[in-house]
Every structure is written in structure tokens, then in C-alpha cells.
Image (tube, rainbow, N blue to C red):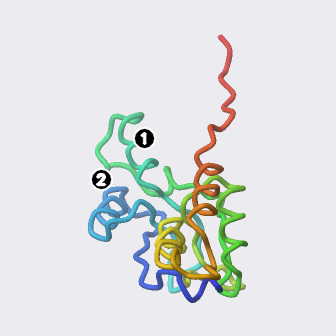
């Protein structure tokens, strides 16, 4: 199955100069934990992503209101994405390798076309569970999630 067949196409996004409370508002209203950040102007080229965790950690570590923090100061500029023509296994592999739950779906110019999430894949697996030839299995989703949730090795500065 190709990503374009199952990705979310109606995706709300932010600009780098937006206040972080705008990203939080999108996450609340859309019931999601991830907002793609697109460059300023007419382009929808993805320049970063911000998650619900990024938002919480920024508020906690900075001791500021979300309205006082710009998205660009919190967003991850390391963008892990996939293409609409990619297959499901490619998206799962990218999620596992990057240890992320969601990927922006972009065209050759990096323009935002949609988002694919592990939740989307899990829902597909649940619907296909009675099929003789499922495109994705709940076991495979579980393996992907286990890989994503594997603790990262974080270097702690010694005193």
C-alpha cells in the first residue's frame, strides 16, 4: 500500500515565527501531537516539526508562557519524511530508524502534502486483522512501536 492512500491530507501547520501556543492550539483542536512547520511565504516547504512533548518541555525548561516562545526556538529542524509513492514498509522503517511516531509526506521540492502516523498504520492493521493477506499486521505495528520507544542513549555531561 502506498502512503498517499492512507496519509492525512488536511494538515494544519505553523510558521517558524508563530508563537508556540499556536502549535498547541492546533494539537488541541485537531487531537494530534505533531505540527509540521513550513517556511514563510507561499511555499509549504517543510522546515521543521514540533511535537506535544517539545511544547511541554519548552514551557517547563524555559519557565515561560507558550505565547512568549517562538516555534523556531523549539522545533526540530531534522526532518524525517517520506514521499506519497513510498510503500508502508518504507514509512515504518523511517519511523523506526528516526524513533518518531509521525512523518510529514512531502513532494520532491519538500512541499507538505500530508502526514502519516503510526496511529494511521495501527488503524489499518486493525481493520485488516481478519484478512487472509493483510497489508500490515498488528504484530508488525507492535515491532515498529517497540523500536520507536527504545530508550535512546543520551550522553550526560560529567561534572
Locate the C terminus and report the quarter of the image it occupies.
top right
Locate the N terminus and report the quarter of the image it occupies.
bottom right
Q: Nearer the viewer, mark 1 or mark 2?
A: 1
Look at 52% across and 55% down and name the residue there. 75
Side of 49 where 33 appears, left or right: left
Write down the quadrant of residue 12 in the picture.
bottom left
Is residue 97 or residue 63 the one in the foreground? 97
CB within 8 Å, label 1 to label 2: no
Q: Position of residue 14 (x, y in %)?
A: 43, 69
- Is tag 1's residue or tag 2's residue first in the polypeptide sequence? 1
Which residue matches tag 2? 67
Look at 61% across and 82% down and name the residue there. 132
Look at 34% across and 34% down and name the residue there. 63
Separation of marks 1 and 2 at Cα, in angstroms: 14 Å
Q: Could you tell me which secondary element the residue under label 2 belongs to?
A: helix
Mark on residue 149?
A: none
Side of 20 where 50 appears, left or right: right
Q: Residues within 10 Å of mark 2 (few under 14, many from 20)?
A: some
Is residue 39 shown above or below 95?
below
Is residue 79 or residue 45 the one in the foreground? 79
Is residue 60 shown above or below 39?
above
Is residue 32 shown above or below 105?
above
Q: Position of residue 146 (x, y in %)?
A: 61, 49
Q: Position of residue 66 (x, y in %)?
A: 32, 49
Which residue matches tag 1? 57
Q: Residues within 10 Å of mark 1 (few under 14, many from 20)?
A: few
Q: Position of residue 56 (x, y in %)?
A: 38, 44
Look at 29% across and 53% down and name the residue there. 67
Amino acid at each position: 500500500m502506498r502512503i498517499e492512500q492512507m496519509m492525512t491530507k488536511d494538515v494544519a501547520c505553523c510558521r517558524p515565527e508563530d508563537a508556540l501556543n499556536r502549535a498547541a492550539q492546533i494539537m488541541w483542536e485537531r487531537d494530534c501531537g505533531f505540527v509540521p512547520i513550513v517556511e514563510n511565504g507561499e511555499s509549504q516547504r517543510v522546515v521543521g516539526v514540533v511535537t506535544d512533548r517539545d511544547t511541554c518541555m519548552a514551557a517547563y525548561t524555559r519557565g515561560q508562557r507558550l505565547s512568549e516562545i517562538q516555534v523556531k526556538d523549539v522545533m526540530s529542524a531534522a526532518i524525517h519524511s517520506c514521499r506519497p509513492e513510498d510503500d508502508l514498509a518504507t514509512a515504518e522503517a523511517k519511523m523506526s530508524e528516526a524513533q518518531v511516531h509521525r512523518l510529514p509526506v512531502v513532494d520532491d521540492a519538500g512541499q507538505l502534502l500530508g502526514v502519516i502516523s503510526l496511529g494511521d498504520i495501527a488503524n489499518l492493521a486493525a481493520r485488516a486483522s481478519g484478512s487472509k493477506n493483510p497489508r500490515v499486521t498488528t504484530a508488525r505495528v507492535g515491532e515498529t512501536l517497540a523500536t520507536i520507544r527504545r530508550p535512546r542513549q543520551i550522553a550526560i555531561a560529567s561534572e
